[in-house]
Image (cartoon, rainbow, N blue to C red):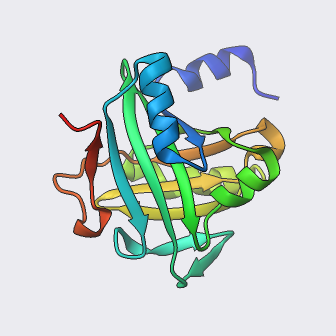
């Protein structure tokens, strides 16, 4: 068992940077966040086989080559990133979650330094939480681990490497437009 003192020490330098929500209608959700909570504008990106780069796209521990697509919209509340995700087609963990739980909170994202990336994922695997989905968007890596059965939500990790430009296939736009 981990002691309270160890937990305090472990938590000192951690950073939760994002709360992610799933939706079946991205525009409706953005409009609601803007109207009801005054959150926006949103940077919207298409995530698919062409915009997700790197060493492939893993879902449920297997490298997937079939086409996939989902849409993300990102805005901020203070320095906390809010992410809305609408699955479209192909293998991802998102539609299954909506089918089982409905729309709403899906994940929290924690920043992991690039030099700690592999060790972090191995540590969570040892704790019974293997990677369920992993990819790369531009220069930034992201990975989800199977935390739902323990924590009742998904845990995402990101190295938060800045992207000086976005992959052209991401079709990035802002909503509402300025």
Residue located at (61% from left, 65% from top) = 92
Where residue 63 sits in the image (x, y, percent)? 57, 79
How many numbered marks are there? 0
Q: Which of 69 and 119 is in front in this view?
A: 69
Let me know if residue 48 appears in the view: yes
Coordinates of residue 1 in the picture (x, y in percent): 82, 29
Quarter location, residue 40: top left
Going 79% across and 45% down the picture, which residue do you hit? 101
Q: Is residue 126 visible?
A: no
Where residue 67 sits: x, y (%)?
51, 80
Residue that appears at 67% across and 50% down: 124
Q: Image height check: is 84 above or below 14? A: below
The vertical placement of 169 against 165, above or below, is below
Q: Quadrant of the C terminus?
A: top left
- Image vertical order of residue 138 relative to residue 4, above or below: below
Q: Nearer the viewer, residue 70 or 138?
A: 70
* Residue 1 falls left or right of residue 64: right
> Compared to 5, does 16 lie above or below?
below
Residue sticking out furthest to the bottom: 65
Q: Position of residue 119 (x, y in %)?
A: 54, 54
In this rendered view, identify the residue nearer to me: 138 or 167. 167
Left or right, 119 with reference to 149: left
Which residue occupies 61% across, 16% down? 8
Q: In which quarter of the image is residue 45?
A: bottom left
């Amino acid at each position: 068992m981990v002691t309270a003192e160890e937990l305090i020490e472990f938590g000192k330098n951690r950073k939760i940077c994002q709360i992610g929500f799933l939706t079946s209608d991205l525009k409706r959700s953005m409009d609601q966040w803007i109207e009801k909570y005054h959150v926006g504008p949103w940077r919207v990106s298409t995530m698919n086989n062409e915009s997700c780069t790197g060493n492939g796209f893993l879902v449920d521990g297997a490298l997937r080559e079939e086409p996939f697509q989902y849409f993300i919209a990102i805005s901020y509340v203070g320095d906390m990133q809010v992410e809305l995700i609408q699955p479209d087609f192909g293998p991802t963990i998102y539609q299954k979650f909506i089918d089982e739980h409905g729309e709403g909170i899906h994940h929290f994202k924690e920043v992991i330094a690039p030099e700690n990336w592999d060790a972090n994922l191995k540590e969570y695997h040892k704790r019974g939480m293997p990677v369920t989905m992993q990819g790369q968007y531009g220069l930034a890596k992201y990975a989800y681990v199977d935390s739902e059965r323990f924590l009742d939500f998904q845990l995402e990790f990101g190295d938060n490497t800045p992207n000086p430009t976005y992959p052209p296939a991401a079709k990035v736009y802002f909503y509402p437009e300025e």
